[in-house]
Amino acid sequence: MPSLRSLTPRWLARAPALTLLILAVAAPAPARAETAALRASFSPDRLGASTTIGFSFKLAASGGGIPAPLSAISLRLPPGIDYLSTTLGLSICQTAVLQARGPAGCPPNSLLGSGSALVEVPFGAGAGKEIPDIQAVMGPPAHENIVVLFYANGLSPVLAQIVMQAELIPGTSATPGRLETQVPLIASVPAGPPVSILSVNTTIGPAGLTYYENRHGRRVAFHPRGVSVPEHCPRGGFRFSASFTFADASTANAAYSVPCPPRHR
């Protein structure tokens, strides 16, 4: 009598192997992971001093290649930073004006800082990297909060002028403030895939800025006062941290602590 095995169709006898193959094909690809590194600085680096805050970040794909396009950044600032005594942003630049004319169309007293960025084009013979100029200006407030508008001017290989809006959520002496930034997708070519941001380096503060005011009928130049470093440095230094969200829904986190400044004798 034929055995049960001999009556089983060959394709059914190989079912376990076929099942494994089907599962392997049907299983979703593992989610990509991005990595981030963050740095920050105060200049001057003195307790209680008016300062320029510098911050930079680098992004990469953990498995190699370029990271997914960036869509949002949440930068958390150290508690105790004084935003009230600053004279930065005495004027406001309207978003439509910045988009149409660039920082040159904004009042000088709306400038807040500057920086640069490194991006990568995902394909094509023109693939490469660029360092566009970035300017930060004071935008119209939102929800009674300060709004910083970042203007990125790309020339080559990506020709684009991008405005990114960041809302400053104030902190207290015990809780960190946050700078919540929305990053629009930047097309590599018309209707093409977006570029990936590899790094950004920028400042917010009076370094390199000149404001103007009228005194006795004359236009007088002056340097604005920046936000103030807290009077006391916590153990471990002033902690910055950031969360990055990408267009494919992946995320990355990074942190950096600015060391406590040396004590002056």
Image (cartoon, rainbow, N blue to C red):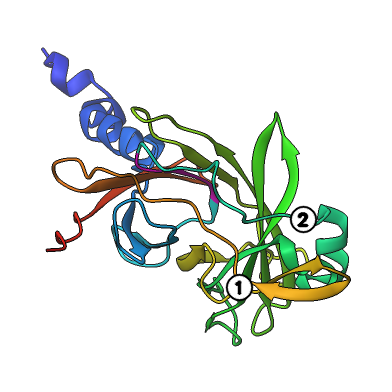
Q: Position of residue 52 (x, y in %)?
A: 45, 63
Outermost residue toward the front?
A: 216
Q: Residue at x 89, y 71 (%)?
A: 217
Q: Which residues are magenta?
A: 71-78
* In this rendering, position of residue 20 left or right of residue 215: left
Q: Which mark is residue 39?
A: none
* Upstream in sequence: badge 2 or badge 1: 2
Is the C terminus in the top left, top right, bottom left or bottom right quadrant?
bottom left
Q: Residues within 10 Å of mark 2 (few under 14, many from 20)?
A: some
> Is residue 77 covered in magenta?
yes
Q: Which residue is mark 1?
A: 209
Three-letter amino acid code of the residue under disc 2: Ser
Q: Position of residue 55 (x, y in %)?
A: 41, 61
* In this rendering, position of residue 210 left or right of residue 247: right
Three-letter amino acid code of the residue under disc 1: Leu
Q: Residue at x 23, y 32 (%)?
A: 14
Q: Nearer the viewer, residue 162 or 129?
A: 162
Question: Helix, strand, or loop for circle 1?
Answer: loop
- Main SS, magenta region, reads strand
Q: Residue at x 36, y 67 (%)?
A: 44
Q: Which residue is mark 2?
A: 91
Is the N terminus in the top left, top right, bottom left or bottom right quadrant?
top left
Q: Nearer the viewer, residue 257 or 49?
A: 49
Using the image, determine if residue 127 lies above or below residue 172.
below
Q: Position of residue 64 (x, y in %)?
A: 31, 65
* In this rendering, position of residue 17 left or right of residue 182: left
